[in-house]
């Protein structure tokens, strides 16, 4: 049988709650309390003391400028609106999964997509 060897060493509690295994000046022997769930670390205090002199006194909130509304784009000309309407139709036909899109439709869609991009919508009526 293998026996378990337990070495009993005395712990010392030194000032500042520092633990040591050697006795030093100002240290007291540590005695276990056999209490579970209790911390020896002091809890922080949240006192409502005087305000710090470096912090500004609370005052009225500063007025926030009103968010600017995006200005509507100027009205596009009729030719640009016609091209955009064609782009929308081709978008539905090519990327919408409809059958019957021809290679010409795909090429035209790519050309118009280069003009209008993903977010470049003209202001058409």
Image: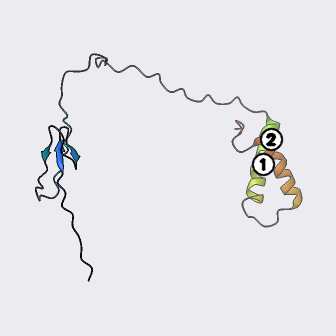
**Callout 2 touching callout 1 (CB < 8 Å):** yes
Instruction: Tell whether 125 sits left or right of 54.
Output: right
The vertical placement of 13 against 71, above or below, is: below
Nearer to us of marks 2 and 1 is: 2
User: Of label 2 and label 1, which has the lower sequence position?
Assistant: 1
Which of the pair 33/121 is nearer the observer? Answer: 33
Is 39 on the left or on the right of 106, as rendered? left
* Residue 88 in picture, x, y percent from top left: 74, 50
Q: Position of residue 56 (x, y in %)?
A: 31, 17
User: In the structure shown, which secondary structural element does the residue marked by tag 2 occupy?
Assistant: helix
Instruction: Name which residue lies at 21% across and 67% down.
Output: 6
Label 1, on which residue? Answer: 87
> What's the residue at 83%, 37% (across, down)?
79
Q: Residue at x 71, y 38 (%)?
A: 124
Compute the Cα span from label 2 to label 1: 10 Å
Decide: is 87 above or below 52.
below
Question: What is the x, y in percent for residue 65?
Answer: 47, 22
Q: Dividing the image into 4 quarters, which one contains the N terminus?
A: bottom left
> Who's the residue at 78% across and 54% down the image?
90
Secondary structure state at the residue bearing disc 1 = helix
When the figure is inspected, residue 109 is found, relative to residue 79, above or below; the finding is: below
Image side of residue 74 versus residue 80, left or right: left
In the picture, the disc for residue 115 is 2
Where residue 84 sits, quadrant-wise, is top right
Across and down, in percent, residue 95 comes to: 74, 58
What is the quadrant of the C terminus in the image? top right
């Amino acid at each position: 049988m293998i026996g378990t060897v337990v070495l009993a060493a005395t712990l010392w509690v030194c000032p500042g709650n520092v633990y040591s295994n050697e006795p030093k000046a100002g240290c007291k022997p540590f005695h276990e309390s056999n209490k579970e769930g209790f911390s020896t670390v002091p809890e922080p205090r949240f006192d409502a003391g005087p305000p710090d002199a470096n912090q500004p006194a609370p005052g009225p909130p500063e007025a926030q400028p009103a968010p600017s509304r995006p200005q509507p784009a100027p009205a596009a000309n009729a030719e640009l609106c016609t091209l955009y309407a064609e782009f929308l139709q081709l978008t539905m036909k090519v990327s919408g999964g409809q059958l019957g899109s021809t290679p010409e439709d795909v090429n035209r869609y790519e050309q118009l997509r280069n003009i209008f991009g993903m977010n470049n919508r003209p202001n058409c009526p």
